[in-house]
Amino acid sequence: MTTQLPKGPIKDIITWQTKHKESKQECGVAEMNTPGTTKDSREALHDTRNATDSVKDWRSFWKDVLNETKIEEKMSVHKQKTIDNFLDTICCALEEMSGEEVFDCFFEAVQSEHEYKEKEYNKINELMDFLIGLK
């Protein structure tokens, strides 16, 4: 039985931790649960004769850890989800209203959201004025 990784940021954190542990093992960093290696590891810290980068190709390492392509995929997934939601709303609305009525509803919704955000902006702006000492 295999365990599925959770999706989203938790998966990225687990992936990063796994890659980090692997890179530590590759460069010979001692773990506390490995008896006898901590002293050797401590002594090896001061021995620079064989010093190398702990991560050979750090650019590809971080690219794999961050997985930049996943960010683009997430953006396209959210965009597609929004398009689907708009499509569902428009299709349902057009069954009962004309195109002009649907447009009016959309305009009213956007205007309502704009007024709400403007009120929120004014509140936070007033708070900033108090914090700065302008009021």
Image: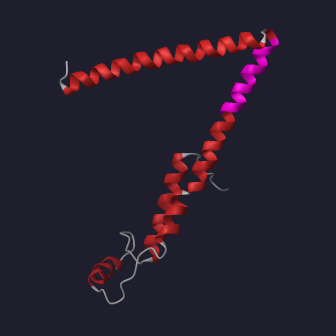
Work out whether residue 38 or residue 106 is closer to the camera in this orientation and state it.
106
Relative depth, front residue between 78 and 4: 78
Magenta residues, dominant SS class: helix
Instruction: Work out whether 51 lies above or below 100.
Output: below
Q: Where is residue 48? Give x, y as percent.
A: 30, 86
Placement of 104 over or under 128, stated as above or below: above
Give the residue at x 77% y 9%. 97
Residue that protrudes farthest toward the left in the picture: 133
Please state the extent of the stretch shown in magenta in the rendering: 82-95
Q: Nearer the viewer, residue 52 or 109?
A: 109
Query: Quick check: 11 left or right of 29?
Result: right
Q: Position of residue 91 (x, y in %)?
A: 78, 20
Q: Whole-percent x and y of residue 4?
A: 63, 51
What x and y, as percent, mark residue 95?
Answer: 82, 13
Which residue is nearer to you in this view: 20 or 116? 116
Q: Quadrant of the N terminus?
A: bottom right
